[in-house]
DNA sequence: AGAGCAAACTTGTCGCTACAACTATTCCTG
DNA sequence: CAGGAATAGTTGTAGCGACAAGTTTGCTCT
């Protein structure tokens, strides 16, 4: 078994990507913690719920959308439930399943936290990249995810943001969240 | 403050990048844990030492090269020291400072772990991307890191893998290459 | 129909990381 | 050449995530 080492180009790309992998999550997390008392993961959990029809999702589905394992999600949901941001509701159709539903308090929390978080994402990622590079990020991530997640579990979510629908993907809550797209900013670089 | 929401292209890129950020570390970690009993971070700690002159680095420098905070590194080094993979040596020049030095056992460990890890990186990243995309990864990461790390602390390391020197591809086995080249480095920095 | 298996969650434990002190040197500046 | 600030590390604690069981419900096959 001969193991081909990485050449300079490959190594350079990897080292840098690794640095991003290491540093970026901490920055995003810190901002949300500071400004909203939420983990980045907690935020996305709430955010995914806020976009779902009826602000409700089954645990498994929510886990997929947040790229989390079920045990992890379960723990997080327990904490969020304790803080009154969401609630567990037994699923009538399948009694094994549990629906996580965003409370009004949780909804308010997301709405309060969103602008700051989006601003951070903008500041650290979107604004420093060109439109072309953003598309490259999409393509590169797709390639990596295809290998990383052969079952295409993540696909369900991340296909959602393709140029698929012209209308909306449906839900009223969703529409409300999306309505904020309205801004026209010809972002600086 | 206008609500700076993300448009479709931006959101798509971000959602996917986020998925990579979430999933990739776990995969790399799992492989190293399984095959070598090392965390990805532990591996890189050892790897950075293995590349350093005399297989020795000061804690602060090592922290920078691994993108870690000092407290984190300190804990990790304590654990690795307990396992005999490296040792703390007081720095003669500055009595506040501590040198972390790779032991022979640690050296062997890195050499044993490297091929599997590189194979994983290859499999999940390098092999699924074109050369062009690899360069895009470099450029994009650079842009993000420049904003993320204004002090350019990371720069010290990741500049190292530019087309600067020859014979310096920076792999953990790099030190081996140096030995082959007869570049024997004694005495610490 | 009932046995066996899979799916959907939960729970408990352990290890790692961030954050916040704290100690010990060295640098700097009047 | 004091004395305060900055630098280099360590340590303690609290909290989150991974992993491994465990439980309940649904599915399937003969």
Image (cartoon, coloured by chain):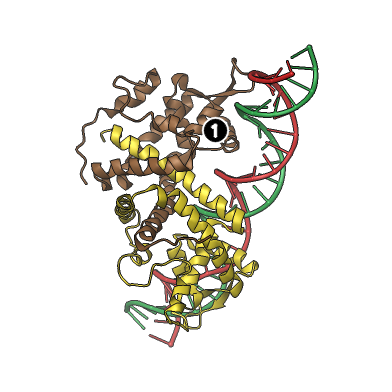
Chain colours: A brown, B yellow, C green, D red
Considering only vertical position in the picture, is C2 above or below A110? above
- Number of marks drawn: 1
Considering only vertical position in the picture, is C14 above or below B167? above
Q: For residue B102, what is the image quadrant?
A: bottom right
| Residue B126 location (% of width, % of height) | 40, 52
| Residue A15 location (% of width, % of height) | 40, 59
Kindly identify the residue that appears in the image at 34 percent across and 55 percent down: B145
Where does label 1 land, which residue? Answer: A80
Considering only vertical position in the picture, is B41 above or below B97? above
| Residue B82 location (% of width, % of height) | 65, 67
Please state which of residues B123 and C25 is positioned toward the viewer in this rendering: B123
Considering only vertical position in the picture, is B162 above or below B140? below
Left or right side of D30 for C22:
left
Residue density around tag 1, few if under 14, some if 14–19, many if 20 or more, within 10 Å? some
Kindly identify the residue that appears in the image at 58 percent across and 74 percent down: B103
Left or right side of C16 for D8:
left
* Label 1: element kind: helix
Q: Can residue B23 be seen in this view?
A: yes
The chain containing the residue under callout 1 comes to: A
Q: Is residue A109 visible?
A: no
| Residue B62 location (% of width, % of height) | 47, 67
Left or right side of A121 for B59:
right
Q: For residue B167, what is the image quadrant?
A: bottom left
Kindly identify the residue that appears in the image at 32 percent across and 47 percent down: A124
Please state which of residues A153 and B145 is positioned toward the viewer in this rendering: A153
Kindly identify the residue that appears in the image at 37 percent across and 48 percent down: B129
């Amino acid at each position: 078994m001969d193991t081909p080492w990485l050449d300079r180009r490959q190594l350079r790309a990897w080292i840098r990507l690794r640095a991003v992998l290491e540093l970026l999550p901490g920055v995003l997390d810190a901002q949300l913690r500071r400004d909203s008392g939420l983990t980045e993961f907690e935020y996305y959990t709430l955010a995914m719920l806020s976009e779902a029809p009826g602000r409700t999702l089954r645990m498994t589905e929510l886990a997929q959308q947040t790229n989390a394992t079920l045990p992890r999600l379960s723990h997080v949901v327990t904490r969020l439930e304790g803080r009154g941001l969401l609630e567990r509701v037994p699923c009538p159709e399948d009694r094994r399943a549990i629906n996580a539903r965003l409370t009004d308090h949780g909804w308010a929390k997301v709405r309060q936290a969103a602008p700051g978080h989006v601003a951070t994402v903008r500041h650290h990622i979107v604004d420093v990249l060109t439109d072309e590079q953003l598309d490259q990020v999409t393509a590169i991530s797709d390639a990596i995810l295809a290998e990383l997640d052969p079952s295409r579990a993540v696909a369900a979510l991340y296909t959602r943001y393709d140029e698929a629908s012209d209308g909306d993907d449906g839900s009223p809550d969703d529409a409300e969240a999306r309505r904020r797209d309205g801004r026209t900013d010809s972002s600086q670089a």
